[in-house]
Amino acid sequence: MSDIRAGRLSDAQLAENFAALQPPMDAAQAAVEAARCLFCFDAPCTEACPTGIDIPGFIRKIATGNLRGAAVTILRENIMGGTCANVCPVEELCEQVCVRNAAEDKPVEIGRLQHFATDHLFRSGAQPFTRAGDSGRHVAVAGAGPAGLACAHALALLGHRVTVFEARAKAGGLNEYGIAAYKMLDERAAREVEFILGVGGIEIETGVSLGRDVSLDALREVYDAVFLGLGHNAVNALGLEGEDLAGVHNAVDFIERIRQEDPATLPIGRRVVVIGGGNTAIDVAVQTKKLGAEYVTLVYRRGAEDMGATEHEQEVAQTSGVLIKHWAQPVRILAAGEEAGGVEFEYTRYDEGGRLAGTGETFELPADQVFKAVGQHFAPSPFQESEAPEMDGSRIRVDEERRTSLEGVWAGGDCVPGNDLTVVAVQDGKLAARSIDRYLRR
Ligand SMILES: Cc1cc2nc3c(=O)[nH]c(=O)nc-3n(C[C@H](O)[C@H](O)[C@H](O)COP(=O)(O)OP(=O)(O)OC[C@H]3O[C@@H](n4cnc5c(N)ncnc54)[C@H](O)[C@@H]3O)c2cc1C
Ligand code: SF4
């Protein structure tokens, strides 16, 4: 009999578990940290930032007390600089290459300084950007995630009108529905959407799905240009016996429930098994532990160095009490009546040809809940009734300006090849907007 129930922890304990991993800096801490920056010429941190934020520039402004200026320096390059301050894997990007990242020193805390500056601006309620005069052009954006919103904001600033079609009830994409609750606190995602819309010229139609309610052909007909920021719209299946048993969940769906519902009402197993090795696997493992699961085991088929999750994320999981088990692949989900009761795994290794292979030796892990986190992909279903852009595997093929193979259609974010990160999606949206602007003014 499986042991799944809501309310394993008190409200106070849940609030403590879902607080930010690191508290925000106060003004004195920010000043001390900003003073550690060497304001490098050709700063490697800026080079490493996918959106090219002038990092020494904004840190210098913090050091001189110009917090609004610091925030504008960030947001000019990355309109989601507030989110990215909290969700970027800085330990693999800007902070990794910081010249202070040496044995006897530590990198400047760029992410926390970025949070300090952007939070100051958001709390002030100021809107620092002004639109150019109306260009008379109107662009359609499909998908209100980081890619679509960044594209819409950059186009609006350039004077174009933008209508965003979003399938879901709320804008924000995975910032609203996917990022771990302890990274995106409060109503931060909604506040950022409001800030972006505050520039004017952008209208969002929620509950409108490309392919279902409106076709790409129709958008191309009516609008001067189209941007596709559709993200991943399908989750990978395990294809194993027992996958449909009660208690087996898609990690992405469950993470969405953690973001959208009261955590105290979410049913949580005493023993949880997570299958996968990326950030989604880590996020669901960490959060089920924070919700009160007693034993959480994350099982990945290869070694630690092959995991999609960053080293920092793996550390967060381990310090949260998640057991990570490498070199094992699932064979089947074990049933306990109609429900999942565990998972049978087979140990793995690389064979002589360097391919991953099962060793034939198996073991079982008991589980009340099993979470599948073996990746998501883009399925081209939104184009069924329309001329479709060329694909590159399971993503939309784009060039360096994020143009698709279709005249007047651009794409960016998770639905095109590249790293699946918020900051990369924002950069895609920005680059596409600049290219669309050139196209509209040609
Ligand atoms: C669980 C999880 C945790 C993550 N954690 C991090 C993290 O910590 N740090 C980080 O940098 N990145 C993280 N990511 C990745 C990051 O969230 C994505 O790379 C980023 O959101 C991609 O932005 P996007 O705009 O391309 O797609 P999305 O954010 O997915 O937005 C796409 C939007 O398009 C809408 N849409 C889809 N189909 C249609 C349609 N047919 N018609 C209209 N609208 C449609 C969707 O509803 C959605 O709003 C995480 C991802 C997941 C799944
Ligand atoms: S690399 Fe480090 S020290 Fe140099 S500018 Fe960037 S944050 Fe400052």
Image (spheres, helix red, strand yellow):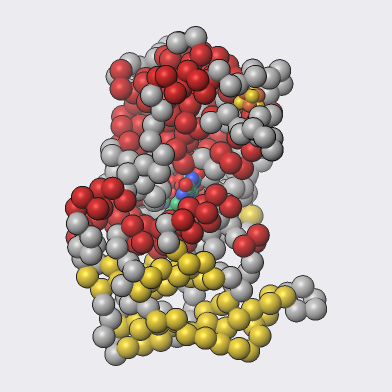
Q: Position of residue 65 (x, y in %)?
A: 45, 10
| Residue at 44% from the left image edge and 38% from the top image edge | 86
| Residue at 25% from the left image edge and 73% from the top image edge | 4
Q: In this view, does 57 lie above or below 84?
A: above
**Picture quarter with the C terminus:** top right
In this view, the residue in front, 205 or 75, is: 75
In this view, the residue in front, 431 or 162, is: 431
Q: Using residue 52 as the reference point, say whether residue 169 is left or right of it.
A: left
Q: List the single residue furthest toward the front.
A: 104
Q: Position of residue 190 (x, y in %)?
A: 30, 36
The picture quadrant where one finds residue 428 is top right
In this view, the residue in front, 118 or 99, is: 99
| Residue at 30% from the left image edge and 83% from the top image edge | 339
Q: Using residue 6 as the reference point, say whether residue 403 is left or right of it.
A: right
**Picture quarter with the N terminus:** bottom left
The picture quadrant where one finds residue 436 is top right
Q: Where is residue 432 in the image (x, y as percent from the top left)?
A: 56, 33
Residue 78 visible here: yes
Q: Where is residue 293 in the image (x, y as percent from the top left)?
A: 32, 67
Q: In this view, does 205 lie above or below 126?
A: below
Residue 218 visible here: no
| Residue at 30% from the left image edge and 18% from the top image edge | 124
Q: Is residue 122 above or below residue 269?
A: above
Q: Using residue 4 as the reference point, say whether residue 29 is left or right of it.
A: right
The picture quadrant where one finds residue 424 is top right
Q: How many marks are shown on the rendered structure?
A: 0
